[in-house]
Image: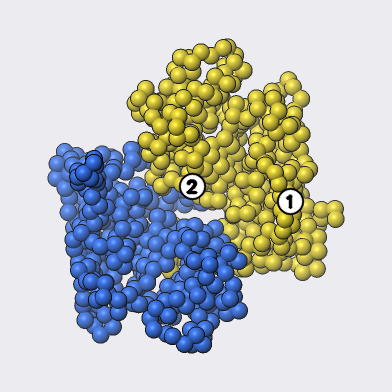
Chain colours: A blue, B yellow
Amino acid sequence: MTTTPLLEVRGLRKYFPIARGLLRRVVGHVRAVDDVSFTVQEGETLGLVGESGCGKTTTSRCILRAIDPTDGQVLYRTRSNEVVDLAPMSRAELAPLRRDIQMIFQDPFGSLNPRMTLFDNVGEPLLVNGMRRRKERMDRVADLLRLVGLRPEFMHRFPHAFSGGQRQRIGIARALATSPRLVVADEPVSALDVSVQAQVLNLLLELQSTLRLTFVFVAHDLSVVRHISDRVAVMYVGQLVELAPTSAIFQRPRHPYTAALMRAVPVPDPRVSGTDMILRGEVPSPAAPPSGCYFHPRCVFAEDRCRQEAPVLRELTPGHFARCHFAEQLTLGAGETVAAA
Amino acid sequence: MTESPLLRVRDLRVSFKLDEGLVRAVDGVSFDVFPGQVVGIVGESGCGKSVTMKAILQLIEPPGRITSGEILYRQDAAQPSVDLAKLPTRGQAMRELRGADIALIPQEPMAAFSPVHTVGDQIVEAIMLHGRQRYGRPISRSDARGITVELFRDVGISMPEQRIDAYSWQLSGGLRQRAMIAMALSCKPRLLIADEPTTAIDVTTQAQILALLRELQRKYDTAIIFITHDLGVIAQMANYVVVMYLGRVMEEGPVDDIFHAPRHPYTQALLRSIPSMHGETRTALPIIKGTLPHPFNRPSGCPFHPRCDDIMPDRCTKAVPMLHSVAQQRAVSCFLHSDQAEPA
């Protein structure tokens, strides 16, 4: 791939200060995102996975500049093929780029204004972006609703009249209102029932191909991420521990945490017995991460080196990165679960 | 199984009378739970799985009401079973069973523990309340504390002597759920109801909690009703599965049959719609068409007919199929398998 990526995150850090005492003195930092780098090509879906507190949401918020990164670059290729760094930009500088990068939220009940009709909810980004004529906005909202599989007549109803799946479609319509190029979806299907989840995943795949969208898909459900992503990035305590094309990472994970995460997913088949190789312990606090490799206290392969020396993210085979000292030696054939015959 | 069931739910119906109309949350549910068996109840939101659980514990609050059906619970082999549905909700008999014979692991341990009492005190209180009956001897406060420390060790809480004096908000999600399991087990229940016990928990912690539940289930031979929407969790935990949709049982049977030979179109469609860990990626998933009907707007006939691919328009829209036994330990409510309808 020689084309410039649509998005490149370089050395991204976000530290939240911990203030204590009367003077609110800063006594430490929560390293929510600690040196994260990746690229996203145009038209691609990058899945960002990890457990709560791993920094996946903070990373996505930094890309959107919903929060300001502490350090690092968020390089975005604009429509005129110019690469700009979103990280240091002021609000005014960001304003024209906002319409290009949109977000789909997790909670379809909390992300829509209950006092606004669908027309207002979906049409607001259009108004903000200068579409003043109501008739024009109505036509556009009708198109958007049709696009996400809702009837345009619904435009004058309020969100409470819709089910979770329908609300998620409304949220998608709103995200698409400004014809974005990059869509950051934060757990867009995790609040939905299985049958609705399948409908929304199909819709996202369909929209991606018709509108040539680029997705950063944040989720904790590995089977969903596997289904929708071209490449997968795994985060643990604020760091990327593995990044690879979907098929490669699921066939042969190279980081022990990735393998453990995959093994932990309960397989919807009673003939595949759950493994007894269960990850012990709990995720450490990003305010006081362990020495060396952050994963070493829970890793069955940990050696002295892991306790002392922090591993770096290395490229093992083209496009497959892992942050483990022993990535080459370990056999972690635990990715794809073998179905019993 | 020649043993007689511990719990026998027969044609249970629960409805909520609201201003807007009557919601039939549970509409004719029947299943058995044998001693030491794990029965999984699976279904999507609004299918009535949680209301069924509440009915068994007699925790339905007005405007909800058990309108008909039986919940036969057999306290021990020598005694005749009691119908929990007929017991007064706040009566002595129910209070002696609830939390002791039949215990609950709730979904949100954060909300279930009181934040102003230590977790240890809350468990000690339960043991002292039911102790004489469950342990067969009077239990002093220090005995109860000793039992709690042992339970904490059993559920894998490290440093139990210190953790017993912690408040729920000082514990991580995983530890809190372990403490909740300790509390549920504290009175040696014969039936444990786990209501989405791992839904609010991360996947690696979930794996730990599920393994713990499996281990404890084997050790104490407790029967469990496991309620979840997660088909993966059901496949890994249950022996017997009840699939619900809109308050009715679509089908039930041994776990292997449900996953490898599902008979009801709903179960079949549901299983197809989950993205697998080894299927093709980035392709359209088979879906269940349409959306869940609004509770005030239940379809006539079979509740699943508007979304069913195998609909027989003359039959399915007009009559409600009866949950009919098609084999030993296997029942389906679908006209494709049995023509019997519910009496109108």
Q: Nearer the viewer, residue A314 or B46?
A: B46
Q: Going by the image, does B341 lie left or right of B143?
A: right
Give the labeled residue for mark 1: B17
Give the labeled residue for mark 2: B199
Q: CA distance from mark 2 to mark 1?
A: 29 Å
- Amino acid type for the residue under numbered disc 2: Thr
Residue A317 visible in the shown view: no
Query: Which residue: 77% across, 61% down?
Result: B301
Which of the chains bears the disc numbered 2? B
- Amino acid type for the residue under numbered disc 1: Lys
The picture places residue A54, in percent across and down from the top left corner, at 31, 51
Share a chain, discs 2 and 1?
Answer: yes
Query: Which residue: 46% across, 22% down?
Result: B148
Which of the chains bears the disc numbered 1? B
The picture places residue A208, in percent across and down from the top left corner, at 42, 75
Query: Which residue: 65% across, 27% down?
Result: B95
The picture places residue A199, in percent across and down from the top left corner, at 53, 67
Q: Identify the image quadrant of residue A240.
A: bottom left
Q: Nearer the viewer, residue A13 or A235?
A: A13
Q: Going by the image, does B162 lie left or right of B279?
A: left
